[in-house]
Image: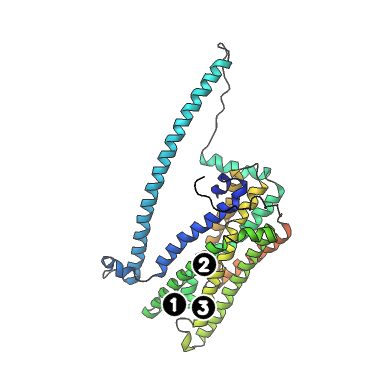
């Protein structure tokens, strides 16, 4: 979200919308690659006796990703080199001008014994970020709590969404027989297609965040996004109960998942793109408005409210195992986290005037 600070307070929403849009474009391309099962036909040399169609599809997708990464890093390295060259030239010029100015104003017999040393090692940056919590506005504490609970509700879905489609919607098993493995593979690809729909909704919804914040206020918009996540996570648990219940009764038409269950699952995937667009934009705009004098340090602290829940979410696998396996326990926990985030956002979050920071005059290219 650095672009939000670089563009200035009057174009935060433009920066956030551009960020969400390009993230959605990248996600669409990536998830479309995962949803396709034809990579082994396009790259037949990847398939062998030791590598089946699913293995060849996976290797081809990774190969395309590696090539894309190499091209991207080469372009970025070139831009960094140009930026570094310009930076060095500007520093040399400024240092020369500063030295000449000091020579003209400083007595010849004076000696400067006070030398200020700056520490920019990673440990010092982390310590500065943690100690800066004391200097943040009191309203930021509520923002950090809501942010942490919001991401605690998102990460279980990010970790188990395609596995949920493969196991509990399509009734497959990656360690079962050939039929169960095929069903699981179909479910995972269908989950990737659902994430593609999620990204499409994410990109479209990013353009509606500004008018919603101007109409309802950022506090209610953020709270509404958490209530939406709560409803969707609860819906996944209900879908799991219905799907597993029908399958356990031996209903023949649910082998591979009934059509209604599959459609409902894709609808949940798509609907989650709307609150995700809000989560990617509104918290950063609120933080930028509340901590206008703190700069990027406040954003660094806000990112800790994302990283720490991500680390905590690594234990959701053990949480699922504690209740007998499956993905439903993690999704139920996520729904309660989202509900708590929505309630705290409604009652405790500030509602700053974001008419300036969320006012967008459109996208500007060049001047």
Identify which residue, 129 or 288, lies in the foreground: 288
Name above or below for residue 64 compared with residue 258. Answer: above
Of mark 3 and mark 2, the one earlier in the sequence is 2
Where does residue 322 sit, x and y in percent of width and height?
A: 55, 69
**Residue 76 placement (x, y as % from top left):** 41, 46
- Looking at the rendered structure, the secondary structure element under dot 1 is loop
Instruction: Determine which quarter of the picture holds residue 312.
Output: bottom right
Query: Marks 1/2: CA distance?
Result: 23 Å
Colouring rule applied to residues? rainbow
**Neighbours of disc 1 within 10 Å: few (<14), some (14-19), many (20+):** many
Residue 188 located left or right of residue 5: left
Q: Secondary structure at mark 3?
A: helix
Query: Could you say which disc has been placed on residue 198 in the image?
Result: 2
Q: Which residue is labeled 1 in the image? A: 172
- Residue under the point 40% across and 39% down: 81
The crowd level at tag 2 (other Cα within 10 Å; few <14, some 14-19, many 20+) is many
Left or right: residue 189 versus residue 311 is left
């Amino acid at each position: 979200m650095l672009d939000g600070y670089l563009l200035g307070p009057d174009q935060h929403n433009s920066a956030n919308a551009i960020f969400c849009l390009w993230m959605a474009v990248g996600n669409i391309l990536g998830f479309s690659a995962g949803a396709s099962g034809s990579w082994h036909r396009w790259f037949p040399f990847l398939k062998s006796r030791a590598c089946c169609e699913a293995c060849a599809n996976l290797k081809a997708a990774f190969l395309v990703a590696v090539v894309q990464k190499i091209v991207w890093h080469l372009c970025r390295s070139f831009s960094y080199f140009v930026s570094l060259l310009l930076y060095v030239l500007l520093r040399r010029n400024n240092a020369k001008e500063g030295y000449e100015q000091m020579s003209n104003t400083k007595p010849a017999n004076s000696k400067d014994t006070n030398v200020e040393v700056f520490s920019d090692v990673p440990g010092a940056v982390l310590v500065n970020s943690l100690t800066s919590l004391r200097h943040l506005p009191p309203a930021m504490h509520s923002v950090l709590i809501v942010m942490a609970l919001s991401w605690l509700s998102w990460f279980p879905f990010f970790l188990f969404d395609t596995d949920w489609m493969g196991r509990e919607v399509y009734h497959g098993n990656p360690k079962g027989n050939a039929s169960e493995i095929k069903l699981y593979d179909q479910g995972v690809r269908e989950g990737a297609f659902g994430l593609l729909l999620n990204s499409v909704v994410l990109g479209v919804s990013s353009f509606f965040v500004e008018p919603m914040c101007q109409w309802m206020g950022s506090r209610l918009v953020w709270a509404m996004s958490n209530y939406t996540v709560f409803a969707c996570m609860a819906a996944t648990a209900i879908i799991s109960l219905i799907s597993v219940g029908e399958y356990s009764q031996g209903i023949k038409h649910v082998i591979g998942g009934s059509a209604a269950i599959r459609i409902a699952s894709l609808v949940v995937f798509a609907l989650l793109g709307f609150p995700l667009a809000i989560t990617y934009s509104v918290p950063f705009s609120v933080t930028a408005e509340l901590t206008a004098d703190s700069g990027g340090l406040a954003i660094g602290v806000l990112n800790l409210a994302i990283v720490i829940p991500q680390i905590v979410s690594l234990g959701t696998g053990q949480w699922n195992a504690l209740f007998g396996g499956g993905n439903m326990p993690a999704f139920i926990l996520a729904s309660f986290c989202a509900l708590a985030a929505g309630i705290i956002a409604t009652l405790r979050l500030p509602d700053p005037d974001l008419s300036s920071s969320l006012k967008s005059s459109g996208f500007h290219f060049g001047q």
